[in-house]
Image: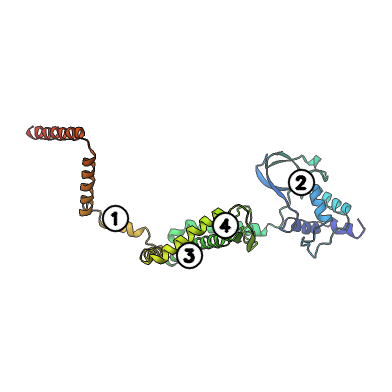
Amino acid sequence: MTAEEVPYWENEENLKKLCDFLRSQDGAAVREAVEERIEKRVHYIKGEKLVTFLAEPKKKTKWPDNIPKFKSRPEALAVCKMLSDIGYLHRCEKVGKGEVSLLPRNRCEFVEDAYFAWIYQGDKRFSNFLTTMLVIGFFCCTCFPIWPNFLKVFVWYMSVTFLIFIFFLIVFRGLMFMFVWILGFDFWIWPNLFDERLGFFDSFKPMYSFERSKSGQIYWRLGVFVGFFSFCYWAVTQPSEFDGFKAAQVDFIKDLYAGKLISDSSQADKENIDKPKMPSLEDLMRMEEEDEEEEEELTEEERVQAMFDNLMDEEEEIDDDEE
């Protein structure tokens, strides 16, 4: 390391800039594990990979303009030792699948064949801002009953709109995938949209993916093709039924926006609470038909037994009346 370079990296502010870059999305790839003693999730990296990333960055690496590049591997190794000495990196060892253990401080010398957990957290202002917003949001939710009515309506409309948007987005992605998959390719819009391992912004990268499907799925494609276009043929040739289906969906969305999806049925129950619940004429006729069908299925012996039981019931009722 030259005389001009040593003062630069001895400045802790410059080391923080380097750590901010390494901890960003463009930095060295890390793994996630749980520290067994404090049961806290940490990110760790092997020393050799960190030194290689600094000394021999790949072409696609977006190196910041305000940080000088390392000219040799010994230079990168020396800076990594500085990061370990000031506590930005802490040596650890694997103790199980997805678990690591931080070693005592006297065994934290930086070596390339060891693993190191990131202790450096970077600037906490954005994290503190998000925490504050979370507390404020939770407080606002608990005070929802005393909100003005126009705010309640606004939140309801926003929630319903978001729900409908997500539903149609899922349906649209699925239909686009099916159309292209029938032709032998896999096409996804926002393929990482529902990947829980990624952050919010990373879930929208890339915008689409297009690649050839696996071979041996020709029969599945033909089956999906026949099934989908059979449904389309039914929708075109049976306009009355399909129109009724569309009208029901439109009414459902209208009731959802108006907040009447549950209140309609509950209001009807309130209005009919004092009315006797008598079966309709159609229900009585259906019950009579079911009884006749059951009688036809009985054997002669079962009919005699049923008649005997009816007579016994009538005699018991007469005796009860006489008493």
Q: Which of marks 1 and 3 is nearer the N terminus?
A: 3
The type of residue carrying mark 2 is: Phe
Q: Which of marks 2 and 4 is nearer the N terminus?
A: 2
Question: Label 3, on which residue?
Answer: 161
Q: Would you say residue 178 is visible in this rendering? A: yes
Rate crowding at label 1 as few (under 14), some (14 to 19) or many (20 or more) other CA atoms within 10 Å. few
Judging from the image, the colouring scheme is rainbow
Residue 253, by quadrant, is bottom left
Q: Are marks 1 and 3 in contact (CB under 8 Å)?
A: no
Q: Which of marks 2 and 3 is nearer the N terminus?
A: 2
Task: For marks 1 and 4, give the CA distance.
Answer: 40 Å
Question: Label 4, on which residue?
Answer: 134
Q: Which residue extends farthest left?
A: 322
The relative height of residue 264 versus residue 32 in the rendered view (above or below) is: below
Task: For marks 2 and 3, give the CA distance.
Answer: 46 Å
Question: Label 2, on which residue?
Answer: 116
Q: Which residue is found at the position 21% from the left and 41% from the top?
A: 295
Label 3, secondary structure: give it: helix
Task: For marks 1 and 3, give the CA distance.
Answer: 29 Å
Q: Which of marks 3 and 4 is in front?
A: 3
Label 2, secondary structure: give it: strand
Q: Which of marks 1 and 4 is in front?
A: 1
Task: For marks 1 and 2, give the CA distance.
Answer: 65 Å
Q: Which of marks 2 and 4 is in front?
A: 2
x and y percent of residue 305 in the render? 18, 32
Image-based side of 73 in relation to 119, left or right? right
x and y percent of residue 82 in the render? 83, 51
Q: Earlier in the sequence, mark 3 or mark 4?
A: 4
x and y percent of residue 135 in the render? 56, 56
Image-based side of 18 in relation to 298, left or right? right
Label 1, secondary structure: give it: helix
